[in-house]
Image: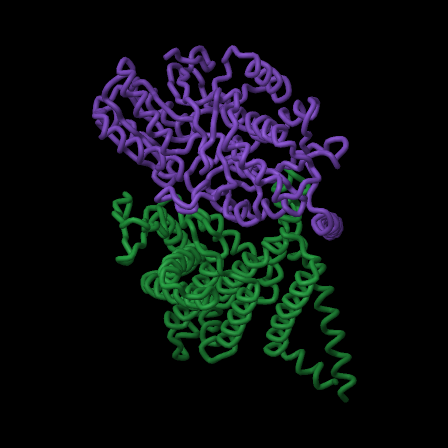
């Protein structure tokens, strides 16, 4: 009898939930994260990202930073934003759903998606519906080009705040060529079933060959792997003094642990996906000492904007913002600058807003915390300088050129 | 009238009629809502994936419910159908074939290739039973995912080019990669429509019901219930199971093709082990062997997380809790008894009125 009582309660709960879902989903789309006062005047800014699931570190970082930026922007003169963050679990199918939920809400400008796979799936819709999207961190070329292989047929309304993956491969090769003091024998460990990792790996290998870098070992792993001893041993046996890791920080942390176990101490070198390794739970951050990475953002930068952002982020969320957060923060400010310059208001038609944004972004120069004098090409690619940072005493420190 | 009621209680006719009625009614209502602009964009965008999952789940239910073999690789067959469809679609697009014809050919190709793979797999697999079979199908799903994750297919004026592990494809100017390894399929020409999905669901239901109530279907169920007894009366058990397995993979292939042509970009990792398990959840929730249940459960569970968007970051947590509650409620003895009593009472009334 006890059980059936429980079941009845459960049934009631499910029905109530269903009714709530219906009343909300049907009528007015979804609730906004920061309902700004005077909604009528606020431009509806939306994005989707992995707010739950494996990649949620990125999605939440973007959401947090965007919230901070929107709060600041709304306190200033000029345009106001109302922000709506939707969960897509970094899945193309869910991203399309999230995009449609945002359109139901009445989204006027967007920060597209946080991850590349999701971005590739929704970018054609941005083109079709003529909505402007500036992604903070979807770095694959497939996000801005319909034909990514030939870098042809750009979507035209999708822009990036981050570097494209091939760009990072080139920049890494350039950096290692210039800074031979880090080492000369390079080993690479990459993830072969990941878009981001192979994107960087392929261009890095091509550039390394062209520039005469000495790549002594290269090994791959796949998502489900949890043991990296073979790959690390291969690099150690080849006598590599630089271990290039164009991968995200979770597997990278395990590789660092494995290298430590084997007593192998090369200079570790990563790209922007390495960012986040210091905030990883249960990871001994002392292992990451001396790790180099190319990222356009370092939280220790001395300029006023970065200091303000880092302080606010730390105060609110208790951790140092990573590069995804910084990109998102810049996205909001870049959108504000473009909206202000073009005189965009919330009552303009979506098509007018989009054409105003595209013409602003292809002509303006933007100074943010992930770089200064940023410009965008007509295809949506950003041009800014990558910075190298090294981890010292558990914090990022910029490396002087 | 009473005769009608009586025929409706004939389980063969009843379950089939209800299935078709539910699907057709849903289609009519949704089309009307969509035409009058009462359907949100979010809901509209879910229609095609829901139908695709329904077809794959119906296939899986044939496998798990009717044939009694636990298959943990259904998503693998879906991905075979999806990626075959992408390649075929690329060729047809280059040849300038219209959208509807392209979709039909792609679905047929996806179904055919998945069925062929299903048949190949079934040769070693169906010698196994129970847990062993489940593990082999699980491994199969993983292998397919890894293979597709490392495959590159490009197309230019000279035709198709294939490469494995490393993208060594050299194409002419204007050539296009259809499948590029971990990046998955990109630049797929969208052709799927809700109507196409609806027709595919009807076809899937027709195929499964015809099979279930045919001589072969009874052989399949007999093999499930008691292998030795079935063999003793001359049923070729492995043949019966192969038929169910191949039909299931064929349906998954068609579903994969429908899914593929609905998204401009997707990766092989979409069809991972989790996806197979999700399909299994749809089947279990709908009831083993119950096709109408599968249709409803799939719709509910695909739409539910999207409808819970207003919960924001607690969405997936609540979804999981709802799932647990639904499973508990649907397996509740008390409720089941009540339903059975209701059914017998109705039946009695029909019989009394007949006299």
Choose top left, top right, bottom left or bottom right for residue A377. top left
Choose top left, top right, bottom left or bottom right for residue A237. top left
Q: Is residue B19 left or right of residue A200?
A: right
Observer-nearest residue: A59 or A46?
A: A46
Position above or below: B253 against A167: below
| Residue A181 horizontal/vertical position (percent) | 27, 13
| Residue B349 horizontal/vertical position (percent) | 77, 79
Q: Is residue A136 left or right of residue B106?
A: right
Observer-nearest residue: B309 or A211?
A: A211
**Residue A2 visible:** no
Choose top left, top right, bottom left or bottom right for residue B39. bottom right
**Residue A256 visible:** yes
Colour displayed for chain A in the image of the structure: purple
Colour displayed for chain B in the image of the structure: green
* Picture residue at 47% right of the left edge, 53% below the top: B276
Position above or below: A137 against A350: above
Quarter containing the C terminus of chain B: bottom right
Position above or below: B139 against A176: below
| Residue B314 horizontal/vertical position (percent) | 64, 38
Q: Residue farthest to the bottom?
A: B355
Observer-nearest residue: B61 or B314?
A: B314
């Amino acid at each position: 009898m006890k059980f059936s009582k429980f079941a009845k309660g459960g049934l009631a709960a499910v029905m109530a939930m269903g009714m709530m879902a219906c009343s909300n989903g049907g009528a007015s789309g979804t609730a906004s994260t920061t309902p700004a006062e005077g909604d009528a005047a606020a431009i509806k800014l939306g994005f989707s990202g992995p707010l739950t699931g494996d990649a949620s570190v990125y999605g939440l970082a973007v959401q947090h930073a965007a919230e901070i930026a929107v709060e600041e922007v709304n306190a200033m003169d000029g345009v106001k934003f109302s922000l709506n963050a939707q969960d897509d679990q970094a899945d193309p199918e869910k991203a399309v759903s999230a995009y449609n939920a945002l359109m139901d809400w009445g989204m006027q400008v967007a920060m597209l998606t946080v991850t590349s796979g999701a971005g590739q799936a929704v970018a054609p819709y941005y083109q079709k519906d003529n909505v402007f999207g500036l992604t903070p961190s979807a770095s694959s070329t497939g996000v801005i080009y319909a034909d990514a292989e030939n870098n042809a047929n750009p979507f035209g309304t999708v822009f990036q705040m981050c570097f494209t993956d091939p760009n990072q491969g080139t920049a890494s090769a350039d950096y290692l060529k210039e800074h031979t003091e880090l080492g000369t024998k390079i080993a690479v460990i990459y993830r072969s079933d990941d878009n981001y990792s192979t994107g960087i790996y392929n261009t890095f290998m091509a550039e390394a060959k062209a520039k005469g870098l000495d790549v002594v070992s290269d090994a791959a792993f796949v998502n489900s792997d949890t043991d990296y001893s073979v790959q690390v041993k291969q690099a150690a046996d080849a006598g590599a003094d630089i271990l290039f890791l164009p991968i995200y920080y979770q597997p990278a942390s395990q590789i660092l642990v494995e290298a430590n176990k084997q007593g192998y101490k090369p200079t570790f070198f990563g790209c922007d996906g390495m960012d986040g390794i210091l905030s990883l739970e249960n990871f001994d951050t002392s292992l990451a000492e001396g790790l180099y990475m190319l990222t356009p953002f370092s939280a220790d930068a001395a300029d006023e904007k970065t200091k303000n952002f880092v302080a606010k982020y730390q105060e609110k969320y208790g951790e140092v913002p990573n590069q995804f957060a910084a990109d998102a923060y810049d996205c909001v400010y870049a959108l504000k600058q473009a909206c202000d310059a073009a005189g965009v208001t919330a009552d303009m038609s979506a098509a007018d807003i989009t054409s105003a944004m595209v013409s602003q972004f292809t002509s303006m120069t933007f100074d943010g915390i992930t770089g200064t004098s940023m410009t965008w090409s007509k295809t949506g690619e950003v041009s800014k300088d990558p910075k190298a940072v090294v981890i010292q005493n558990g914090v990022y420190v910029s490396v002087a050129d | 009238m009473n005769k009608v009621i009586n025929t409706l209680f004939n389980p063969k006719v009843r379950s089939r009629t209800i299935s078709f009625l539910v699907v057709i009614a849903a289609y009519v209502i949704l089309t009307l809502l969509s035409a009058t602009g009462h359907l949100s964009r979010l809901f509209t965008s879910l229609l095609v994936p829901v139908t695709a999952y329904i077809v794959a789940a119906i296939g899986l239910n044939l496998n798990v419910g009717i044939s009694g073999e636990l298959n943990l690789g259904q998503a693998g067959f879906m991905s075979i159908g999806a990626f075959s469809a992408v390649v075929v679609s690329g060729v047809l697009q280059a040849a300038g074939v219209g959208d509807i014809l392209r979709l039909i050919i792609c679905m047929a190709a996806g179904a055919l290739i998945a069925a062929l793979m299903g048949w190949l797999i079934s040769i070693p697999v169906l010698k196994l039973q129970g847990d062993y079979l489940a593990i082999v199908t699980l491994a199969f799903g993983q292998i397919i995912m890894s293979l597709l994750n490392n495959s590159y297919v490009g197309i230019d004026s000279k035709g198709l080019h294939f490469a494995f592990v490393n993208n060594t494809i050299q194409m002419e100017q204007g050539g296009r990669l259809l499948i590029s390894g971990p990046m998955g399929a990109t630049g797929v020409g969208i052709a799927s429509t809700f109507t196409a999905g609806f027709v595919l669901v009807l076809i899937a239901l027709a195929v499964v019901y015809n099979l279930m109530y045919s001589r072969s279907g009874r052989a399949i169920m007999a093999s499930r219930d008691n292998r030795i007894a079935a063999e003793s009366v001359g049923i070729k058990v492995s043949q019966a199971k192969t038929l169910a397995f191949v039909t299931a993979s064929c349906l998954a292939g068609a579903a994969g093709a429908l899914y593929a042509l609905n998204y401009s970009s997707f990766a092989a990792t979409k069809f991972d082990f989790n996806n197979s398990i999700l399909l299994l959840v749809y089947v279990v929730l709908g009831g083993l062997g119950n096709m109408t249940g599968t249709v409803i459960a799939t719709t509910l569970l695909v739409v539910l997380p999207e409808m819970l968007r207003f919960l924001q970051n607690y969405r997936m947590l609540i979804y999981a809790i709802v799932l647990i509650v639904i499973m508990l409620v649907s397996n509740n003895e008390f409720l089941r008894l009540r339903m059975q009593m209701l059914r017998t009472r109705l039946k009695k009334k029909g019989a009394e009125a007949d006299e």
